[in-house]
């Protein structure tokens, strides 16, 4: 991995961390998923499968520093998200031969977001961190799916408009 890739992952991670730092929970969730999937997608386009994993690892550690007793969960779920993005994008062939397949990108980003949402919300409910209510589950899954689609699309637009010509 090149030094510039680590620097870019660190920059993406700092953006994610500051967004979570500036907005208190649960309001940070409204923007954080959209921002994370967008930056994880860009990391994938630039660095390949390892990009979202490195970015999620760094951002997970940064966010865990302010989460106290939930630090381990924060790191694990962040890493899970990065792994899912990298693996699903690779499996679905989102980025191949200098082309991004927008439909595949939207599917993969939505599926990764929903899987992490279900696992993290389910764990949080089992541990009593958040209450279980069917309405809350429906709202969280709907918001997660919407943010997955929007984040995937936003990363596509940003990549095509700003990054595509810059990367070797």
Image (cartoon, helix red, strand yellow):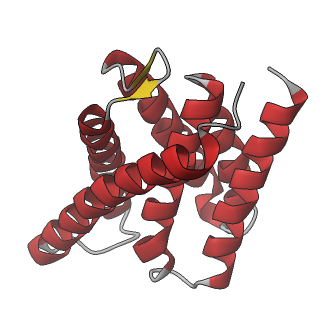
Query: Given the current orientation, which residue lies at the most extreme right position?
Result: 3
Residue visible at 52% across and 37% down?
82
Front residue of 23 and 150: 150
User: Is residue 24 found left or right of 131 in the rendered image?
Assistant: right
Residue visible at 53% across and 51% down?
161
Residue visible at 24% across and 37% down?
103
Residue visible at 28% across and 54% down?
149
Percent x, y of residue 12: 69, 53
User: Is residue 13 found left or right of 4 in the rendered image?
Assistant: left
- Residue 45 position (above or below residue 97): below
- Residue 98 position (above or below residue 160): above
Percent x, y of residue 122: 28, 54
User: Residue 48 is drawn in which quadrant?
Assistant: top right
The answer to whether residue 126 is seen in the rendering is no
Front residue of 168 and 148: 168
The answer to whether residue 42 is seen in the rendering is yes
Percent x, y of residue 25: 51, 80
Front residue of 123 and 40: 40
């Amino acid at each position: 991995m090149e030094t510039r890739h680590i620097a870019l992952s660190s920059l993406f991670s700092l953006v994610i961390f500051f967004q979570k730092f500036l907005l208190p929970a649960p309001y940070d969730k409204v923007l954080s998923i959209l921002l994370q999937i967008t930056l994880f997608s860009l990391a994938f386009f630039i660095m390949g499968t390892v990009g979202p994993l490195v970015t999620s690892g760094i951002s997970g550690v940064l966010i865990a520093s302010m989460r106290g007793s939930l630090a381990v969960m924060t790191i694990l779920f962040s890493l899970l998200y990065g792994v899912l993005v990298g693996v699903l994008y690779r499996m679905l062939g989102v980025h191949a031969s200098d082309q991004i397949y927008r439909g595949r990108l939207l599917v993969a980003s939505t599926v990764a977001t929903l899987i992490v949402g279900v696992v993290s919300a389910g764990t949080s409910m089992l541990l009593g961190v958040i209450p279980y209510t069917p309405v809350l589950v429906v709202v969280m899954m709907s918001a997660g799916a919407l943010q997955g689609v929007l984040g995937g699309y936003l990363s596509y637009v940003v990549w095509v408009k700003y990054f595509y010509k810059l990367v070797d």
